[in-house]
Structure formats: structure tokens, C-alpha cells
Amino acid sequence: MRNIYVDKNGGRDFTSIQAAIDDVRVHPLEPVTIFIKAGIYHERVIVPDNKPDIQLIGDNTQQTIISNHVYANMLDSNKNMLGTFQTPTVSILADNVKVENLTIENTAGFGPKIGQALALYVSGDRGIYKNVRLLGNQDTFYSCRGRQYFIDCYIEGHVDFIFGSGTVVFTQCEIHSLREGYITAASTPNDIPYGFIFFDCRLTGTAKENTVFLGRPWRPYAHTLFIRTEMGKHIKQEGWDNWRNPDNEKTARYAEYDSSGPGSAKEHRVKWATTLTKDEVDLLTLEQIFHGRDGWNPSV
């Protein structure tokens, strides 16, 4: 195991997180842990796909912050708009990456002149995120592919702020809606059994009452489950939106189990979403959801 220490104020191995990552050899021969001292790191961080087995461990979520301010409607040097996927503050492209005890934020704000502004982009497989805060507005977290496990995390935004085609489990997380919008926009492929699954989470928000949907399908076979989730009054009574396409109601895989709080409103949910049984929920173990071909289980 190799340890690297980052302190923006100097006195350690590096003053920037990206410099530490750049120092890791391609296809490292041993796992690498990068310890990040408290401070605000104004940089864009990329863990490339040829540098797996890296851990980014901050001092604590409140004081270890990776921050940037890039948004979709910004212009590049050729006067072209950047677009959504050029905006992340942190991009995790490698497999077996763990992130813990820090905040990742995109401070671009919201509005038509800004558009999407990602805090975190992930396309690596077998990622673990523990005690992490993701702060943004539209499109805060994008899971492009792969399997990710979030535990004890805080994620905020307003429109489609958890989106993509990956298989992601959120356990005991707080999902905070800043204003009216949509929490999820899954694009789960038809042949992938699991998309976004929330266990024992809390849906909080400063959004007005009855203004936030649980999700809408970015692609027809979107898969999203809320299990034993406490839902605030900002959650819309109908729960789910079809993204202006009734055909999505035939294919989207949306369900809840044992929702609680003023936003749970089971009797008012759209008819094309379902309620899981206890037997079905009992089968939804981390081992089952994440098993794949390699039998990955992040709880082991």
C-alpha cells in the first residue's frame, strides 16, 4: 500500500489532488491512498481509467472540499458550448476507487444561461463513496456506467440531479431537493436488472410542497426503487413523471416499499409504478444487486 499526502498549504507531498493522482504510475502495482488535508481545493480532478485501486480520503466532509465552477453553456476557445459532460468537478474513470470524508461541489448555480453543471461523473466500476457530500443544481451526479455504492452520503440538486445508466445503491443517504424538479433520471439499459436503489434514505428539501418528482425516465427502461425511504412534503403525490412520453409508462421500472412521511402518499401514486412486497425486498441484497460476473460485494 502506498500513501500520498496532499495539503494545499504545503508541507506534504503535494499541494493539489490532481498532482498526486498524476504521480501514481499507470496500472499501479499496489493500492494507493491519497490523504487530503482540510481546505478548499479549487481544481478539476480526474482519476483516469488506467489508474485503478485509488482511495481519496479527506479529513472531513465539512472542511475538505473539491470545488469548481464549470457549466454546460460556457464557451470553449472555439466559441462552442461545452455541453453537459465537460463540466464535472471530479471524474472517476477508473475501477476500484473509494472516496471518503470530503465534499465535491460545482458552484455554477442554476438557470437557463448555465444549464447542467456536474459535481461528480463516474464511469468506473466497483466504486465506494462513504460520508461524501455532492453539491450542485442540475445534474449533480452522473453514473455513466458500472456499479457504485454510496453510504452515509448527502446529495443535493434540483433537476435530474442523480442520473445515468449505472447500477447505484444509496444506503442511509440524505437526498436534498433545492427547488422543484426531479430527483432521478435513470437511463438503465433494458438488459441491466438494477439501476438506482435507495435503502433507508431521507428525501429532504427546501423545495415547495408537492413540487418534486421521485424520477423521470431518461431512457425507456429506467429502473429506480425507493425502499424504506422517508419522504418530505416536497415530494409530489403522484411520485413519478413519464417525461412527456406515455410509452415510457409501459417500460419504466419504478417501485417503492414502505415509504414514510408526508411525501409517501401511496394512494395517489401513478398507476404505472408498483409497490414491492416484503419477499421481493428481502431478495435485494448488496450481493444480489452488485454480483455481476465477478461476485463483487462492497459490504464484505
Image (cartoon, grey):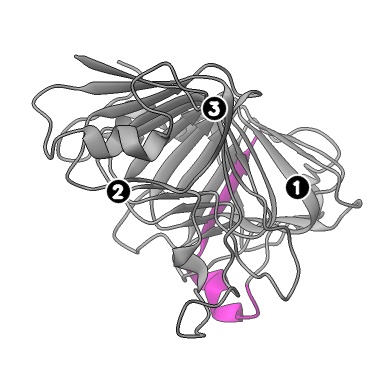
| Residue type highlighted by circle 3 | Leu
Q: Is residue 45 left or right of residue 210?
A: left
Q: Is residue 232 left or right of residue 189?
A: right
User: Which quadrant would residue 99 be assigned to in this image?
Assistant: top left
Secondary structure under badge 1? strand
Is 252 part of what is drawn in magenta? yes
* Distance from the alpha carbon under mark 2 to that under mark 1: 27 Å
Instruction: Relative to 83, say whether 140 is above or below.
Output: above
* Distance from the alpha carbon under mark 3 to that under mark 1: 20 Å
| Residue type highlighted by circle 1 | Ser
Which residue is denoted by mark 2 in the rendering? 93
Quadrant of the snapshot with the C terminus: top left
Q: Nearer the viewer, residue 252 or 25?
A: 25
Q: Residue at x 13, y 40 (%)?
A: 26
* Distance from the alpha carbon under mark 2 to that under mark 3: 18 Å
Q: Residue at x 22, y 40 (%)?
A: 292
Which residues are the magenta region? Answer: 243-258
Instruction: Relative to 17, say whether 252 is above or below.
Output: below
Is 292 part of what is drawn in magenta? no
Give the label, 2 or 1, closer to the camera. 2
Instruction: Relative to 255, say whether 39 is above or below.
Output: above
Q: Position of residue 46 (x, y in %)?
A: 36, 47
Quadrant of the snapshot with the N terminus: top left
Q: Position of residue 161 (x, y in %)?
A: 61, 54
Secondary structure under badge 3? strand
Q: Residue at x 81, y 46 (%)?
A: 265
Which residue is denoted by mark 1 in the rendering? 177
Which residue is denoted by mark 3 in the rendering? 102
The answer to whether marks 2 and 1 mark residues whose Cβ atoms lie closer than 8 Å is no
